[in-house]
Image (tube, helix red, strand yellow):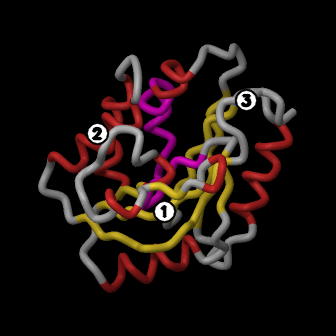
Amino acid sequence: MPFVTFVTRCNGRPRMLAANKLSVAEQTDQDWEQILITDATGMGIYAANRSLAANGHRVVGEWVYILDDDNHLVDTQFVATIRKLAKNEKCDIIVVKSVWMGGIILPRPEYWGRPPARGQIDSLNVIVRQPIWKRHIAAFGKPSCGDFHFIKELFDYEYQVCWIDRVVAAVQQIGSLTGR
């Protein structure tokens, strides 16, 4: 069983996917797997979110992190850091920071260490233990803001949340097909 499963939803952006895969391959701790979920039809974010549940059986890693094809890791120590934290702390969910278009860092300081707020947290900010991920993955199936519904549902339960004040990933280009 790999330590981390990177779940990557793909939608016809080969250059961005190549950068995504390279950022995962550059991890200093190589105990991971990456599964690709391909949307060959361009069905949109709702279908992409539902595809997570449909492919949940493929995820076997101890921890799960969604890193879509238009995202990439900026922290080569990401897997090693999660391993160290999981060994030393009782964590079910780990929250990290990510860089969005225009250099915006989420969660913003006023939302850091607090329950999730819509538009202020994203799947790039949350790493989840696999059984918990599978238990709540259906929340992604909401018609809009599936990532927020998933994260909010996680926080509604009595899970142990650990916060790492560290930027680990970045968005390459939001929802664009120009990264071909």
Q: Which residue ends up furthest to the left in the rendered image?
A: 158
Q: Residue at x 42, y 58 (%)?
A: 108
**Residue indicated by mark 2:** 136
Q: Determine the CA span between mark 3 and mark 1.
A: 22 Å
In front: 7, or 142? 142
Residue 135 location, x and y as percent? 27, 41
The answer to whether 46 is drawn above or below residue 152 in the figure is above
Q: Determine the CA span between mark 3 and mark 2.
A: 28 Å
Residue 59 location, x and y as percent? 48, 46
**Residue indicated by mark 1:** 97
User: Is residue 1 in view?
Assistant: no
Which of label 1 and label 2 is nearer to you? 1
Residue 67 location, x and y as percent? 59, 48
Amino acid type for the residue under numbered disc 2: His
Q: Which mark is residue 176?
A: 3
In front: 119, or 21? 119
- The question of residue 66 being in magenta is answered with yes
Q: Earlier in the sequence, mark 3 or mark 1?
A: 1
Residue 171 location, x and y as percent? 65, 48
